[in-house]
Amino acid sequence: MALGPFEFAKYKRPHFEDRNLTSDSAAMRDVAEMRTEDLGDLLGRVSESSTTQIDNLVGDFGRLREKMRVDGERIQRDIEEYRALSEQVMRLTKTVSESVEKVRASVDR
């Protein structure tokens, strides 16, 4: 069976003569427009809130970066002080060891 062209007449939307339905349609359009405005306002508030949160995070990251820099410098200084102290201990240990050897040598004579 071959398909023929559509009969568009049977697919037409019904036409309402009742004035209440027409005013209801207008009211629904007004509500839809109002909701569109509300959505625009909501989108603006969400966008502003998101932007504020992002700005706060960027600020937090900047402060954390500065703290890491300061802490890194402090750790570098601590490492340098430890290295210097370690060298002093090694020199002192060598001096004490040499002194003990001298004492042993003088006792053994």
Image (tube, rainbow, N blue to C red):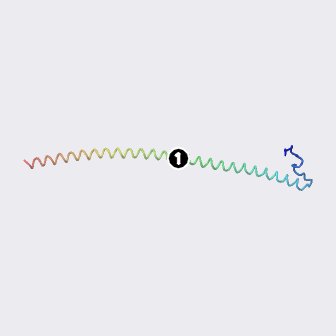
- Counting from the top left corner in percent of width and height, residue 91 is at 24, 44
Q: Secondary structure at mark 1?
A: helix
Disc tally is 1
Looking at the picture, how far across and down is residue 2, in whole percent?
Answer: 84, 44
Q: Residue furthest left?
A: 109
Which residue is drawn at the image coordinates 92% and 53% (left, top)?
Answer: 17
Q: Is residue 103 left or right of residue 31?
A: left
Q: Residue furthest front?
A: 1
Is residue 97 left or right of 41 when viewed as pictured?
left
Q: Is residue 59 left or right of residue 92?
A: right
Which residue has dot 1 on it?
Answer: 61
Residue placed furthest toward the right: 17
Residue at 19 percent across and 47 percent down: it is 97
The residue closer to the viewer here, 10 or 38, is 10
Residue 109, percent from left and from top: 7, 47
Q: Residue furthest bottom?
A: 20
Q: Position of residue 39 (x, y in %)?
A: 73, 50
Residue type for callout 1: Phe
Crowd band around label 1 with a 10 angstrom C-alpha radius: few (<14), some (14–19), many (20+) = few
